[in-house]
Structures are given as C-alpha cells and as structure tokens.
C-alpha cells in the first residue's frame, strides 16, 4: 500500500476551519484516500473517502489534488469535540483483505 | 446492534494467563477486523475475517494469538500465556464485504498484563 505523510500535530481556534494535509505521493490509480479520526478512549471513526473527485458530507470535505499526490481534510467550523487524532489512509480497491493500514496521524487540538 | 460491541472494556491479566476478548459486530456485516493499538501509536492490523473464514492473519504477532469467528458473527481474540508487551487496546471493526463505505470500530478492550 502507498504510504502517507501527515504533520504530527496541529491546532486551530474553535469556530474556524481546520485544514489537515496529507501527502500520498506514491498513490496508484486504484487506491482510495480515506480519513478516520480517533477521539480519546474511543475506536477510530470513519469520516470520508474519495478517489479523485472532491467529496463532501455532513462531517467534512475532502479535497484531492489533480495529480492525486496529496489531499486535505477540511472541518469547516471546528468545535472542541473535533479534538482528536486524524488518520489519512490509502487503501487499494484491489486488496482482497480490505484492511486499513494506519500511520501515526495528526493530533488536532481545537482551542476555545 | 447499532454499533460494534466489545467486551470486556478493561482486562487485567497476570503474566502467563490466557485471555479471551469478544467482539459483537454490526448485524449483517460480513467483514470483521482485529487491530492492536499500543499507547500513543496508530492501530496495527492483526487479522481479518470474511464471514467465518479467516482470510488474512498476517498481523498476528506470534502463535500465542488466535482468533475465531465460527458462525460468521461474534468473534473472539484469544491470547495465550500473556506477556507484558501484549498490553494494548484491542480494537474490533466490522463492515460490509468490501468496506468501501468505511468500517465501524468498537471502543476496544484495554488489556494490561502485570
């Protein structure tokens, strides 16, 4: 699987947009970009995923560059409850195991 | 059920003791995964089931670790002769067969080996 690179930590002010970057320069054409987050003492939670088009749901937006080598997860109006570790994961559509390979993620702190 | 349920929530085991961790996936979810998460690190894949078939056990760290899902629903992760390095949170996740729409994780079982 392609590996991803994320900043170790970030912070943003409550009510502002949080933009979390992810580099996946070796991604191949049949690999999705997934984002999960993990709030303290809970299991990871699915946020959003995409292949090459930008995606938006009730939680976040995912912007994928045209060359697909990087992406940004956007939380439009961060709240204190968005403080968590955010994982960017690349997963092959062809992987018969369908497993997710987590990295170290980005620890996002939302400040009051 | 509405979510993935794991039990017990916490387990303290003496070194050398055997433990069994249970996972109740979302009803109808074909795929089930076990992960191990050490303190301060991301989850690491252990094993994967599709229905009752264990299709990938490449992440199991040793032959002391054993997982089963005999009827294709509830799964048990068993660790024999526990050691201190087995201390971690053990997470279970379930999904539809491909998991394209994301996996649902349980809250995990925190195992402490003393």
Image (cartoon, grey):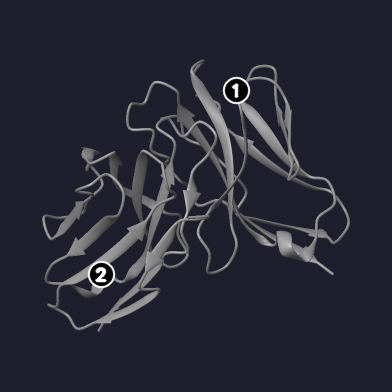
Question: At 30% from the left edge and 54% from the top edge, which residue is drawn?
Answer: B74
Residue A27 shows up from this direction: no
Question: At 39% from the left edge and 64% from the top edge, which residue is drawn?
Answer: B6
Q: Chain of mark 1?
A: A
Q: Is residue B39 left or right of residue A56?
A: left
Determine which residue is flagged by label 1: A51
**Number of numbered markers:** 2
Q: Position of residue A79 (x, y in %)?
A: 80, 60
10 Å crowding of disc 2: few (<14), some (14-19), many (20+)? few
Determine which residue is flagged by label 2: B85
Question: At 74% from the left edge and 42% from the top edge, which residue is drawn?
Answer: A60
Q: Is residue A96 left or right of residue A112?
A: left
Of labels 1 and 2, the one closer to you: 1
Q: Quadrant of residue B72?
A: top left
Question: At 25% from the left edge and 69% from the top edge, which residue is drawn?
Answer: B85
Q: Position of residue B54 (x, y in %)?
A: 21, 40
Q: In the displayed structure, would residue A72 be above or below residue A102? A: above
Element assignment for label 1: loop
Q: Position of residue B19 (x, y in %)?
A: 20, 71
């Amino acid at each position: 699987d392609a590996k991803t690179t994320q900043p170790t930590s970030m912070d943003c002010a409550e009510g502002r947009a949080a933009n979390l970057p992810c580099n996946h320069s070796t991604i191949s054409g049949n690999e999705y970009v997934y984002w999960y987050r993990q709030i303290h003492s809970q299991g990871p939670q699915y946020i959003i995923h995409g292949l090459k088009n930008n995606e938006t749901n009730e939680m976040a937006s995912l912007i994928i560059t045209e060359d697909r080598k990087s992406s940004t997860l956007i939380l439009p109006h961060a709240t204190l409850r968005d403080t968590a570790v955010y994982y960017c994961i690349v997963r092959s559509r062809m992987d018969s195991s369908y497993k997710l390979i987590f990295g170290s993620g980005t620890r996002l702190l939302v400040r009051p | 059920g509405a979510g993935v349920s794991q039990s017990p929530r916490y387990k303290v085991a003496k070194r050398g003791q055997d433990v069994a961790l249970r996972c109740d996936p979302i009803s109808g979810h074909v795929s089930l995964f076990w992960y191990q998460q050490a303190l301060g690190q991301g989850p690491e894949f252990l094993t994967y089931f599709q229905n009752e078939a264990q299709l990938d056990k490449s992440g199991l760290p040793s032959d002391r670790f054993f997982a089963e899902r005999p009827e294709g629903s509830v799964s048990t992760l068993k660790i024999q002769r526990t050691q201190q390095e087995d201390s971690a949170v053990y997470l279970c996740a379930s999904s539809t067969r491909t998991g394209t729409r994301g996996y649902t994780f349980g809250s995990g079982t925190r195992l402490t080996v003393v």
